[in-house]
Image (cartoon, rainbow, N blue to C red):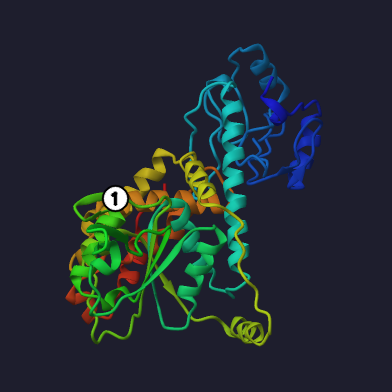
Amino acid sequence: MLAGDLAVHVDADEDRLAGLLRDGQGVFPGALPLNLYRLGPVLGGRGVPHLFPSDAFGQPVLLRGRERAGRESGGEQDGEVGGAWHGSVSDGLPAYPNPGGATLTRPHSGAKNLVSDASQASRVAEAADRLHAIAAEVERVIVGQEQLLRGLLIGLVADGHILLEGMPGLAKSLAVDSLARAVGGVCHRIQFTPDLLPSDLIGTQVYNPKTGDWTVHEGPVFGNFVLADEINRAPAKVQSALLEAMQERQVTLAGQTRQLPDPFLVLATQNPVEQEGTYPLPEAQLDRFMLKVVVDYPDREQERAIIERMRRSERPQVQAVATPQQVLDARAALDEVFIDEKIEHYVVELVFATRDPAAAGLPALRDHIEYGASPRASIALTRAAAAQALLDRRAYVTPNDVKAIAHDVLRHRVVPSFEAEAEGRRAEDLVQQILDTVAIP
């Protein structure tokens, strides 16, 4: 017997099932409502494609009577489930369908894993619902900027710092503050200036003449969300003070190592045009940002909606719809999102193409890329793709998830050469050419 409510008793003939499949969704006796993710081939007389209920993110819940009987008896009968089934029914679950064309095989074995899979799907669904609730709350004050909001949510659940680049007045700081309020976290804002000192970030010791003791005053870096506004306006010694905090989630203050709160997220902003009096971020610090999100102008309708909203006497306020602990729970659910080996190989090929374009079939880029992405980019791209899948309410990653987030992960890690700059080619263009060339699994 299949586990729990995911069991589906199918006694109808295959013609009727094929008709239901062509309708795109159906409800079977004893089954959850089915929302088909992808229709496999309807195999007239050979079997029924595996289905994926929207509530369970990829759990196989529909089997032919012969395969169901084999599971109930514990026997190993060959399955002929549509399209992506390999081996016997009791060898494992069917492979995930993949819009990119690859067959992504799950490494589970036996019907007993359906119980844990159902629990996993429930945790993924709960995490996705929580993230969408946070997004809906932020959208009460932020009009448009879907790319910005998506990047913030991916960084939040994937535990990665974010660099926001855009012109002034595009709601970068407001979006960060709204996100912190929506999750009930502590948000500290630091306005970076040329005269800022490292102690202004991490804190300092203050002498109390009455008691003769030194008291440690923690700096604004001790918060769940640290908004580093115009980070490129502070000198290198201040920027480097963030390195330990961003990488190790700790700082050294008064000779002691102090742990930062969890979750801890650095969200930095910078202006792409005003370069006078700025200190460009070194590659070592840029590499510690999981994402670099480029914030663009709103369209006409969105800007009109902004004007209308600002005319109201009572403006909407963001309320806490989650807690920091629920953010940590969502991160734990992210670790359960399935990533096939083919996806991992695809990520590695993309990153290696930034280092050795000629080996990837891009000899023309050899003189256009000064430095490629580090292994940290592979880690970031994998986790960000899993977060993208989770936001789409899926418990598995497809190549489309990798491509959707690749620009945000790689644009600040690929350094164009002087030749590329002379030809007007940006890192964006180089990354796109790599995505267009590297074969999708």
Question: Hey, which residue is sitting farthest front in the picture?
Answer: 210
Residue 260 percent across, percent down from the top left: 35, 52
Q: Is residue 209 left or right of residue 300?
A: left
Q: Is residue 426 left or right of residue 34?
A: left
Residue 412 percent across, percent down from the top left: 30, 66
Residue drawn at 60 percent across, 16 percent down? 77
Q: Quadrant of residue 197?
A: bottom left
Q: Quadrant of residue 246?
A: bottom left
Residue drawn at 40 percent across, 55 percent down? 264
Q: How many marks?
A: 1
Q: Which residue is mark 1?
A: 258
Tag 1 secondary structure:
strand
Query: In this rendering, is residue 148 above or below 327?
Result: below
Between 43 and 408, which is closer to the camera in this rendering?
Answer: 408
Q: Is residue 96 left or right of residue 418?
A: right
Q: Is residue 86 left or right of residue 16?
A: left
Q: Quadrant of residue 133?
A: bottom right
Which kind of residue does numbered mark 1 sit on? Answer: Arg
Between 6 and 170, which is closer to the camera in this rendering?
Answer: 170
Query: In this rendering, is residue 268 above or below 307?
Result: above
Residue 137 percent across, percent down from the top left: 62, 64
Residue 399 seen by the camera = no
> In what quadrant of the picture does the N terminus appear?
top right
